[in-house]
Amino acid sequence: MERNQMRRQVGLMRQSLFTQGYLDEQFIQLEELQDDANPNFVEEIATLYYLDSSRSLQTIEQALEKTPHDFSKLDNHMHQFKGSSSSIGAKKVKAECQQFREFCKTGNGDGCMRTFQLLKKEHATLKKKLEAYFQVMIDASQV
Amino acid sequence: MEVMKSLSHVADSKQQQEQQQQQQEQQQQQQQQQQQQHFHVLAVDDSVIDRKLLERLLKCSSYKVTCVDSGDEALKYLGLVDHDDLKSADSSSSTPPSPQQQSSELEGSKVINMIMTDYCMPGMSGYDLLKRVKGSSWRDIPVVVMSSENVPSRINMCLEEGAEEFLLKPLQISDLKKLQPYLLKTLDQPSCNSSTDSSNNLVVEDIGDDDHNGQSNISEEINKGSMMNNTNASSISKRKAVSTETSERIPKMKGLVVA
């Protein structure tokens, strides 16, 4: 009984990640690449993303502190960051990246900084949600 | 009586022939599947996430993968770095290969069946890498360029430089299926006897005497499924000449089924 309950919980959590817009269909691609031979692929790539992207965020933060802003450089960094976020299906994060790039194009430093804060928030929220989701999956598999 | 005997004899030998043919086909199919499993793709991307994704995508299709993180590393791997550069850079390979390389083989060592490269990379871009490869003895290897940005001029530029495909990131399983025809094509290339026509397409001579009508199906599906512009459409029909003889023996060309 408990196993079924836990599985249902996993399913619900997963569903809400999509319906609430945190993840897009690219995440489903990742799930489809997971198999018995590579049972932890999704978690692995998500972990790798958070390691890599945290570093990128630091770089961008430092670049934002330098004035006048080098928008071309900022845009470059964000292009890369957007790419990784897109590859794992991080929908909201990707949207903030896009907004940031728009502000870079128009040379709007304030816009960039505001968006960057929102981006960090989305990045952190997704991380928490994914961690919780992976944990529930592990728990469910152990019942 | 005699006639009956000879008739049944004919029937028997025909059956034998069919059986033999079936066996042969099975063997060839197995061989091709094995060969397919040994397709080796060189993946070039500066993003660690994208490398991991690409690696998984390719391995899922049973290809062997080597990932490098830059165009320079790719050139080193292909042995296209100048002697002088080799001295200063630390390279794991020993001596560069001799200039006379065949379509996908290196004398006695590396076999690459396809190169997949990101477009936007610091230092050497995917386009630069494409140019270097197409200007080298590795020119016959299909090169696929990937980018997260859908810029038509960029796409055309790459296709004109000889890229076989331009894929939009993030890559999906269905994108890999588009690549199967290019890899299967490399199976049919004899190691010599190949020449390139003016638009940098491989034209293979002495393929086979049989005229297979099934070939047209495959090229049509390539057209439907890929992101190619018009200039490449003509080169697709040139690829018709490349024998798909052996591919027909594979019962399920799942990579070519276009939804």
Image (cartoon, grey):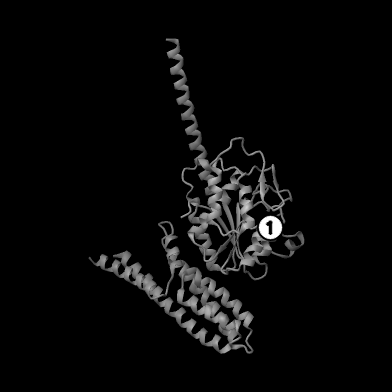
Residue located 48% across and 74% down the image: A50
Q: Is residue A106 left or right of residue B257?
A: right
Residue located 58% across and 51% down the image: B182
Is residue A26 something that shows in the picture?
A: yes
The residue to which callout 1 is attached is B133
Camera-nearest residue between B220 and B170: B220
Residue A35, picture quadrant: bottom left
Q: Above or below — where is B86 with respect to B19?
A: below
Where's residue A76, x and y in %? 61, 76
Where's residue B41, x and y in %? 58, 55
Q: Quadrant of the N terminus of chain A?
A: bottom left
Q: Farthest residue in the left direction?
A: A1
Q: Is residue B161 left or right of residue B169?
A: right
Q: Quadrant of the C terminus of chain A?
A: bottom left
Q: SS at mark 1?
A: helix
Where's residue A23, x and y in %? 43, 72
Q: Is residue A124 left or right of residue B106?
A: left
Residue located 31% across and 66% down the image: A140
Where's residue A17, x and y in %? 38, 73
Mark 1 falls within which chain? B
Q: Farthest residue in the top direction?
A: B1
Q: Amino acid at mark 1?
A: Val
Is residue B58 something that shows in the picture?
A: no
Camera-nearest residue between B81 and A119: A119
Residue located 34% across and 70% down the image: A136
Q: Alpha-carbon neighbours of circle 1 within 10 Å: few (<14), some, or many (≥20)?
A: many
Q: Above or below — where is B95 with respect to A47?
A: above
Q: Above or below — where is B104 with respect to B169?
A: above
